[in-house]
Image: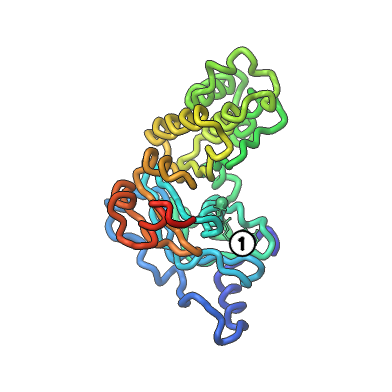
Amino acid sequence: MSNEIQQSSEIDTALENLPADANLPTTHSSSAVPMEASEEASSRTAINIQNLDSWYNNLDFQALHDVCLRFEKNHVSALIGPSGCGKSTLLRWINRMNDVVAGASVRGTLQMGDLDILAATTDVVDLRRRIGIVFQKPNPFPKSIYDNVAFGPRLHFNIGKEELDELVEWSLKKSALWGEVKDRLKKSALGLSGGQQQRLCIARAIAVGPEVLLMDEPCSALDPASTARIEDLIYELKEQYTIVMVTHNMQQASRCSDQTAFFFEGKLVEVGDTTDVFRNPKEQRTEDYVTGKFG
Ligand SMILES: Nc1ncnc2c1ncn2[C@@H]1O[C@H](COP(=O)(O)OP(=O)(O)OP(=O)(O)O)[C@@H](O)[C@H]1O
Ligand SMILES: [Mg+2]
């Protein structure tokens, strides 16, 4: 596949050519899906996912099945589930990173306000400014601490030196790193500890003014002290941003998130308030997973 997102019509054509007994989702188009239950719910929703299906290897493998889910503004949503259940796949469609995966395709609706995220006409560079992502392994650029944070603003905004200095300082303060790096801004980011690098990646993500922060296991490579710092940070950042966090750490999900979504084999099994999902799950599989019986 090219960098172009594979469109529903192409997927439908390809699906028609598969054997009759292939295990396929019910056919639907995004236009057939009622988008909002109420205007109030709509105004609280940062991202609305409707009937999302996703495949890899040119439709050979379906990684997500009919996922419907909302992420509320200024909430932390945790995505949990065993390895391979599709958590990262979902994040990677939300900021269109899967566009560059050969053979990956998607069908359904991903809406951010008025923006149809999956539309071929969506400006992906601007989308990734509005929806930042932080990965499991911190990935600072091999540049100075300052240049890491300044990279996005230089790319997206016409910004003078003084304003850029202020923005770098603001981002590093917001990500609770300023005190530790303010005297070494011109030093290489690669000289920072893992926990500091992860906070730098968060600073880099927020420097361009995103609305949503996606975090894919942001603490799994960190020691307990760094993990605690990032968790505190997540709590503070949600005042300003909508956060979607993948985690394998059940304590972390219950400590940090407002909403938890449990996935199993590409399907959303259960979603609800985090306290309900952990204390009073509706589904047996959720209970088994959150109590550590599998996964
Ligand atoms: N680039 C790819 N090409 C083919 N298959 C892929 C690709 N990326 C992921 N998959 C498959 O899609 C499924 C979902 O993968 P995904 O990475 O979304 O899982 P995950 O829930 O994030 O797992 P983990 O907890 O291990 O990170 C898996 O079966 C995986 O092997
Ligand atoms: Mg993953």
Q: Residue at x 46, y 64 (%)?
A: 267
Residue 198 appears at what percent x and percent y?
57, 32
Of residues 106 and 219, the one nearer the viewer is 219
Q: Is residue 58 above or below residue 181?
A: below
Which residue is under mark 1? 5
Q: Quick check: 116 above or below 168? A: below
Mark 1 crowd level (few <14, some 14–19, many ≥20, 10 Å Cα): many
Asked if residue 283 can be seen in this view, the reply is: yes
**x 38%, y 54%: residue:** 70
Residue 144 appears at what percent x and percent y?
A: 69, 24
Q: Quadrant of residue 63?
A: bottom right
Q: Is the CB–ligand 1 distance for label 1 below 8 Å?
A: no
Give me the residue at 37% from left, 43% from top. Answer: 254
Q: Residue furthest top?
A: 183
228 relative to 8 in the view: left or right: left
Seen in the picture, residue 217 relative to 186 is either above or below; the reply is below
Residue 270 spot, x, y in % from top left: 37, 59
Give the side of residue 263 with respect to residue 258, left or right. Answer: right
Q: What is the quadrant of the N terminus in the image?
A: bottom right
Mark 1 lies on a secondary structure that is loop
User: Above or below — where is 73 with respect to 31?
Assistant: above
Q: Is residue 43 visible?
A: no
Q: Quick one: 112 or 26, which is closer to the camera?
A: 26
Q: Position of residue 75 (x, y in %)?
A: 37, 42
Q: Quadrant of residue 37?
A: bottom left
Give 254 or 8, whichever is nearer the viewer.
Answer: 254
Question: Among all residues in the image, which is located at the extreme right?
Answer: 142
Seen as rendered, the residue at the extreme front is 293
Amino acid at dot 1: Ile
